[in-house]
Amino acid sequence: MVPRSAPIRTVRMDGLSLEKVSHAFGDLLVVDDLSLSVAAGEILCLLGPSGCGKTTSLRIAAGLERIQAGRVVIAGREVARPGKDVAAEQRGVGMVFQDYALFPHLSVRDNVAFGLRGPAAEKRRSVDELLERLDIASHGDRFPHLLSGGEQQRVALARALAPRPAVMLMDEPFANLDVRLRDRIRDDTLNLLRQGSAATLMVTHDPDEAMRMADRIAIMRRGRIEQMGTPDDLYRHPANKLIAEFLSETNILHGKVNEKGEVETALGPLAANGLESGLEVDIVLRPEALVMDGEKGGLAATVHTVRPLAGWTVVDLRLPANGTALRARCTCETPPSPGDTVRIHPDPAGTFVFPRDRH
Ligand code: ATP
């Protein structure tokens, strides 16, 4: 069942746009009136819970899934609407999907050279350069089935990047790489995509990856985009609890707005930011917004555990008054020790109050 959409307005642009796209598998609506545009040179990350329709949206853009409603425009050319589906290989897009889809009968080098045109010497040079950059030069003559998952993933990336596509579609393209390799391959891939002014739509499960890579992030839930913006916008102004939770670890408190426009919480009264009295709310508190500064006015908390983690110190706390467990993160030069009592207070910049999310 696909809902009927309002008439479609044409937007002409260089990159990629999905306009009012809906898609159902049987009775299950998995993409619901989704519109987004990616400009040339831009990287847009689709982020959201498992099953929210990210991969299906990407497959529709790629031409791997027949479109049911809405349309897809690539470089100003309509490539899909109901009744019209330009074949995937004629859309001029590079793709890296989770199955890699490498040609089993071709060597790594020939897989990467597959979509290239032009003189043989030039093709060879650009293939060698890509294999080198993606750290698979020593596997050039091997066949895909002899490679590990992470190596196959890099061959798929090299093959997609080789023709310098105007539009790049990637589904978890770095998921199989170990952490050390992932950072470097990701940076190199991004540089290549930006140099080539590709419009890139990328699906990821990893919020850190999205925050780090994306010019904009679109957060999806149940087939719809809940919020789209720069990583900074989304981090500072999340529209709801799901979005705040997706972008970092959080502490969640619950409460009800009182007559004074405050919410009584385990941390004491917090401003309800204009929400109406009587409303049940979720309070989302980022760990770095739980400030441990020793101020006398703060609330006493007992340090439970202390762990160093990638430039931060993560401190798990308990409130002696009510046993509430909270997580704080600081860049403190002298971190507290387990058993210490610290004084904490929430920084309003990382504290968000939303009507209770029942989903
Ligand atoms: P994940 O992050 O787990 O990869 P996703 O957000 O990419 O999830 P999709 O793969 O787009 O989600 O799937 C959306 C929903 O559609 C899921 O419930 C999935 O089971 C269902 N689905 C996907 N492909 C098919 C199919 N070919 N037939 C039936 N249902 C499908």
Image: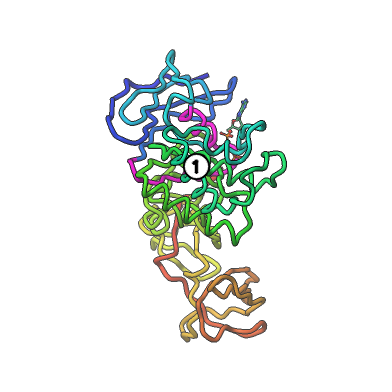
Is 275 or 19 nearer to us in this picture? 19
Residue 317 position in % (x across, y down): 61, 74
- Residue 29, quarter of the rendered image: top right
The scheme the figure's colours follow is: rainbow
Q: Is residue 54 magenta?
A: yes
- Residue 201, quarter of the rendered image: top left
Give the residue displayed 44% in from the left and 65% down from the top. Answer: 350
Give the residue displayed 37% in from the left and 52% down from the top. Answer: 230
Q: Secondary structure at mark 1?
A: helix
Residue 327 position in % (x across, y down): 58, 69
Give the residue displayed 46% in from the left and 57% down from the top. Answer: 212
Residue 130 position in % (x across, y down): 50, 48
The quadrant of the rendering that contains the C terminus is: top right
For residue 69, side relative to residue 222 (left or right): left
Number of residues whose C-alpha sits closer than 10 Å to that of mark 1, classed few (under 14), some (14–19) or many (20 or more):
some
Is 269 or 24 nearer to us in this picture? 24
What residue does disc 1 label?
124
Q: Is residue 92 above or below residue 332?
A: above
What residue span does the magenta drawing correspond to?
39-62
In the rendered image, the residue lying farthest to the right is: 146
Indicate the quadrant of ligand 1 in the picture: top right
